[in-house]
Image: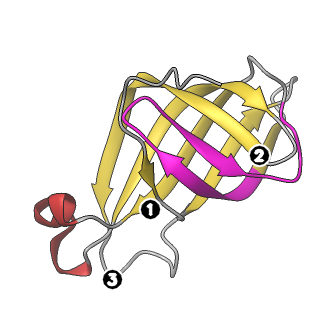
Amino acid sequence: MEEKRKLERFELNAPARVLLESGSSKIDEYNLTTRDVSSAGAFLYSSQSLPEGANVRMEFLISLDTLQRIAGEKGKAKVRVKGKVIRSDSDGIAIRFDNKYKITALDSNNSHNGLH
């Protein structure tokens, strides 16, 4: 199978929280782990499938040297994005991000994993 991706993907095993609106103001929450990310999307390990085309909100922790100025001495930042499920298979789900995102530095007042 020919590789279609044009953006570089980076292996990243990070805790992630995915929120899926499932109708009538009910929100389903999934605590997953990323397998890889790019500037356009992510693949997350999941034993449950999510409906393709579903709009989701996602946040995950990322620790990279390039974010150190933002994250301060903790060396971690929380990334919040919105996106759409574009694939769901037995290994997990693929989410394509939209163009809006927010990166927030974590401080000592945040919870142990920073996802909330």
Is residue 84 found left or right of 10 in the rendered image? Answer: right
Q: Quadrant of the C terminus?
A: bottom right
Of 57 and 15, the residue lying toward us: 15
Could you classify mark 1 by the number of other residues whose Cα lies within 10 Å: few (under 14), some (14-19), or many (20 or more)? Answer: many
Ranked by sequence position, the earlier of labels 3 and 2 is 2
Q: Is residue 107 above or below residue 66?
A: below
- Helix, strand or loop status at disc 3: loop
Ranked by sequence position, the earlier of labels 3 and 1 is 1
Name the residue type under label 3.
Ser
Residue 37 included in the magenta stretch of the image: yes
Is residue 115 found left or right of 64 in the rendered image? Answer: right
Write down the region rendered in magenta.
Answer: 30-50
Q: Is residue 85 above or below residue 59?
A: above
Residue at which label 2 appears: 92
The residue located at (38%, 23%) in the rendering is 6
When asked about the image quadrant of residue 84, the answer is: top right
Name the residue type under label 1.
Leu
Ranked by sequence position, the earlier of labels 2 and 1 is 1
In contact (CB < 8 Å): disc 2 and disc 1: no
Of 32 and 104, the residue lying toward us: 32
The residue located at (65%, 25%) in the rendering is 1
